[in-house]
Image: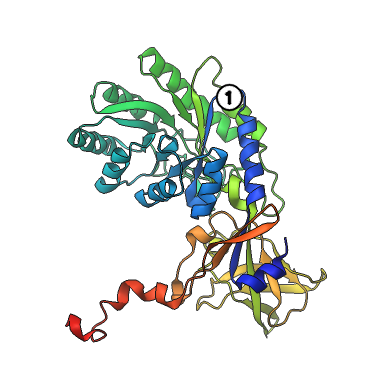
Amino acid sequence: MDFTKLARKYQTPLYVYDFDYIRERFDSVKEAFRARKSLVCYALKANSNLSVLKHLATLGAGCDCVSAGEVKRALLAGVAKYKIIFSGVGKDDGEIEFALKEDILMLNIESEAELKRVEKIAENLKVTARISIRVNPDVDAKTHPYISTGLKKNKFGVDINTAKKLYIYCKNSPFLEPIGIHCHIGSQILDIAPYRDATAVTAELLRSLKALEIDIKFFDVGGGVGIRYKDEVTIEPYNFAQAVLANLSGTDVTIVCELGRFLVGNSGYLLTKVLYEKHNGERRFVIVDAAMNDLIRPSLYDAYHEIEAVDKNGGGTLADVVGPICESGDFLAKDVILPPLEHGDLLVVKSAGAYGFSMSSNYNSRLRAAEVAVESGKERLIRRREEFEDLVRLETEYLEGADEENR
Ligand code: LLP
């Protein structure tokens, strides 16, 4: 990929996504589940750019959404309604109503209180809500505590016994139709064992529900398969599928997975230019034009993203790569080896396709980056760079004195 050309044409900071890579990743998951009916519901929180969604939808993906906004994005990008699922611990009434009216595939329910709310809203709308229940299997995914979700102490899902009770409740409600079982144990998972353990728990529930004549059609194993940022040994799609399928012999369910990072993480690059270099005592700082508002993962999780100087020889000395934001937590990397750099030199931050732009903000009134897709050697803009007017549009009309007529 010609980063220099892209940076010249679209300026920096710039997100660039390799759409061919996304296709390869998607195909590898479908291939791994080839022996079964499967539905890959892309977790669009990882990267919700409409063109990314459309690309995946064209390949056959559904979407896992966590807000009405995400459901709307999926619909706008052309994702089929019957491939959209809606997860999340705190759906509000408006969101539930919207999802039911849009008739999406199912809502993943995370508590008894939420189930009752969905039932009430479905009754008001005179519809039957297709649901699945998120089971918290109490399994340790051994990942960063902020992104581990399958332990009893986490806020997600319900325990197995409560889940069973809720399914029985649904069976007796004319407004609830339980069609799925859901489980998601965390993110950036590198070990296959937690998947096997979690699906063992949910598969047992599946069988006991069958005995109660509750017909579950979708077995949703969540997402979370990790990627390589540095030197991690990651899970192969085939092994992921085997771990899931190990407990499902003799069952006839569609396997749903909600992968986000796996599909898009390594497809993305954040291009940024060097503004200045400085030394404070012993420490070398490379100040760049991207910041924690563009990519918050290093600041928030101490996450590692490889950074390389484009068109420079290797070697160099240790440096911290930091942004212009007024916080010491504003860094993209610490203690990385970089060659001598000067104003205008280009750096590329790798593996930035997931939870990069989608977690970006306007902190310090910074304009969010542009996004570009590269497919079959051709690039195209998929989100224009923000302008100052975009930043203040929702405030200017309320500015006292700004518009005489409004007073
Ligand atoms: N399904 C559910 C219900 C989820 O909560 C998540 C992620 C996924 C699927 C997709 O997980 P993935 O396949 O992308 O690992 N901001 C963090 C990651 C937060 C993940 C939250 N839930 C990060 O930058 O590492």
On screen, residue 96 versus residue 65, left or right, reads: left
Residue 237: % across, % down: 65, 36
Residue 378: % across, % down: 67, 58
On screen, residue 388 versus residue 199, left or right, reads: left
Give amino acid for label 1.
Leu
* Residue behind mark 1: 245
Task: State how many labels appear.
Answer: 1
Could you tell me which quadrant the C terminus lies in? bottom left
On screen, residue 63 versus residue 33, left or right, reads: left
Q: Is residue 206 above or below residue 104?
A: above
The image quadrant that residue 308 belongs to is bottom right
Q: Is residue 47 visible?
A: no
Q: Is residue 13 above or below residue 193?
A: below
Residue 87: % across, % down: 39, 41
The image quadrant that residue 398 belongs to is bottom left
Q: Is residue 110 visible?
A: yes
Depth order, front residue of 378/283: 378
Depth order, front residue of 138/190: 190
Q: Is mark 1 within 8 Å of ligand 1?
A: no
